[in-house]
């Protein structure tokens, strides 16, 4: 039996509590701020915490550490600590994490087809101004 098209599946809000909706759950995992930036950077290869922070830019170190812990608990990345002085921590994608390359590629293709750089920048600047005015 073929799966129902995504648009026809019920959202989790309308589904019984025991029902598992993989689309809803995947969006829940991936929508965390910086999550896809981290995965995208790690698609280039394993790297340490500071290297990763520089690659994604602008992420608070506490937030980065929290996201990395979450991704590790979900089995999307592995963390390796080398017993050197000082200790070096390295992060790499697991096979499940590497599977997100298709998702990121699809988002990239969609963005290139449907988003205009000037419109997105104008919205981003507008949001920043509203935050500062509060």
Image: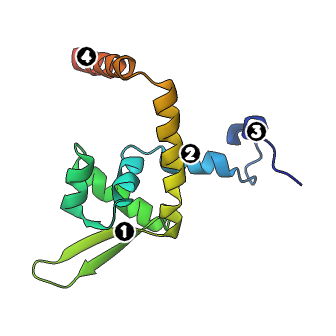
In the structure shown, which secondary structural element does the residue marked by tag 4 occupy? helix
Seen at 33% across and 55% down, the residue is: 41
Q: In the rendering, at what x and y percent does residue 80 appear?
A: 31, 77
Dot 3 or dot 2, earlier in sequence? 3
Dot 2 or dot 4, earlier in sequence? 2
Q: In the rendering, at what x and y percent does residue 13 appear?
A: 69, 38
Distance from disc 1 to disc 4, alpha carbons, whole Å, reads 37 Å
Seen at 29% across and 50% down, the residue is: 63
- Residue under label 3: 10
- Residue under label 2: 27
The answer to whether 49 appears left or right of 104 in the picture is: left
- Residues at discs 3 and 2 in contact (Cβ within 8 Å): no
Distance from disc 2 to disc 1, alpha carbons, whole Å, reads 21 Å
In the structure shown, which secondary structural element does the residue marked by tag 2 occupy? helix
In the structure shown, which secondary structural element does the residue marked by tag 3 occupy? loop
> Is residue 61 visible in the rendered structure shown here?
no
The answer to whether 101 appears left or right of 67 in the picture is: right
- Residue under label 4: 129
Label 1 vs label 3, nearer the camera: 1
- Residue under label 1: 92
Front-lying residue, 13 or 58 = 58
Seen at 27% across and 71% down, the residue is: 90
Distance from disc 2 to disc 4, alpha carbons, whole Å, reads 28 Å
Dot 1 or dot 4, earlier in sequence? 1
């Amino acid at each position: 039996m073929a799966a129902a098209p995504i648009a026809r599946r019920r959202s989790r809000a309308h589904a019984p509590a025991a029902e598992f909706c993989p689309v809803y759950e995947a969006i829940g995992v991936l929508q965390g701020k910086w999550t896809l930036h981290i995965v995208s950077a790690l698609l280039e290869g394993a790297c340490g915490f500071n290297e990763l922070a520089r690659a994604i830019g602008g992420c608070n170190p506490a937030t980065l550490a929290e996201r990395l812990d979450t991704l590790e608990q979900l089995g999307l990345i592995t963390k390796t600590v080398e017993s050197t002085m000082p200790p070096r921590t390295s992060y790499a994608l697991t096979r499940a994490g590497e599977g997100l390359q298709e998702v990121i590629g699809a988002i990239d293709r969609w963005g290139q087809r449907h988003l205009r750089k000037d419109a997105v920048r104008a919205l981003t600047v507008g949001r920043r101004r509203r935050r500062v005015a509060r």
